[in-house]
Image (cartoon, helix red, strand yellow):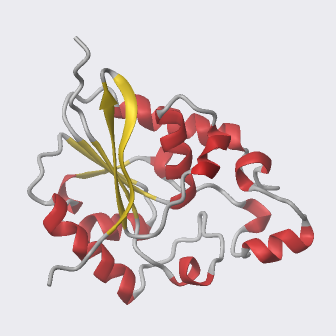
Amino acid sequence: MFENLQEIYVIRHGETEWSLSGQHTGTTDLPLTENGRNLAKLLKPLIVHHSFDRVLTSPLQRARETCSLAGLGEKAEVDNNLVEWNYGEYEGLTSKQIDEKRPGWMIFADGCPGGETPAEVGARADRAIARVRTVSGDVALFAHGHILRVLVARWLGLPAAAGRHFLLHTGTLNVLSYYRGIPAVKIWNAPLIPAE
């Protein structure tokens, strides 16, 4: 039978000072801004009553705090495969600053000097996906922009470089699932709208 009803809720953390300024935030462990905390709180009514068999989060505080404010912190397990791309020498720089040093640079094709390659990030995404697929029920993942863009590409069987095709803003809700047994995207980059 084709049916696989598992859903994977993929949640990018709320806003930080560096996501606001456009600085690449890999392993720098920044907290959420007040707006980032408010975004994370908007998740709670959408997911807190959902039954998740497993909740996984990046070890970085911006992801863990988003998970907690969304109401799932007590169920969460840290998964180091969900940590953000290691930007190496590009940590803290904006895309404009990087482009001045290396015109035409694209993380999904070029990786980062002193940091990770697309293949290394793809391998981490594959390990996270393999872990998710051992669970029969729904799973929530709390992580970061670039790793999650690679994760959705790998979920679909695409190369890590295909992450360039999946824009992802902070504090967004995304759902991966299956169509007739084939990995599919159900919701992507959905903004959170406050209740009126």
Instruction: Estimate the x, y position of residue 162 in percent, counting from the top left.
Output: 63, 42
Q: Which residue is drawn at 50% across and 43% down?
A: 151
Instruction: Estimate the x, y position of residue 190 in percent, counting from the top left.
Output: 36, 62
Q: Count numbered badges in the picture.
A: 0
Residue 128 left/right relative to 114: left
Outermost residue, top side: 1
Q: Can residue 22 be seen in this view?
A: yes
Q: Residue at x 12, y 51 (%)?
A: 50
Outermost residue, bottom side: 34
Quarter that holds the N terminus: top left
Residue 19 left/right relative to 58: right
Can you say whether 109 is above or below 42 in the image? Answer: above
Instruction: Estimate the x, y position of residue 86 in percent, counting from the top left.
Output: 65, 56
Can you say whether 89 is above or below 109 in the image? Answer: below
Residue 104 left/right relative to 193: right
Can you say whether 112 is above or below 170 in the image? Answer: above
Viewer-proximal residue among 192 and 133: 192
Instruction: Estimate the x, y position of residue 51 in percent, counting from the top left.
Output: 11, 46
Residue 64 left/right relative to 22: left
Which image quadrant for residue 118? Answer: top right
Can you say whether 82 is above or below 4 in the image? Answer: below
Q: Residue at x 24, y 24 (%)?
A: 4
Q: Residue at x 48, y 67 (%)?
A: 169
Q: Is residue 70 visible?
A: no
Quarter that holds the C terminus: bottom left
Which image quadrant for residue 100? Answer: bottom right
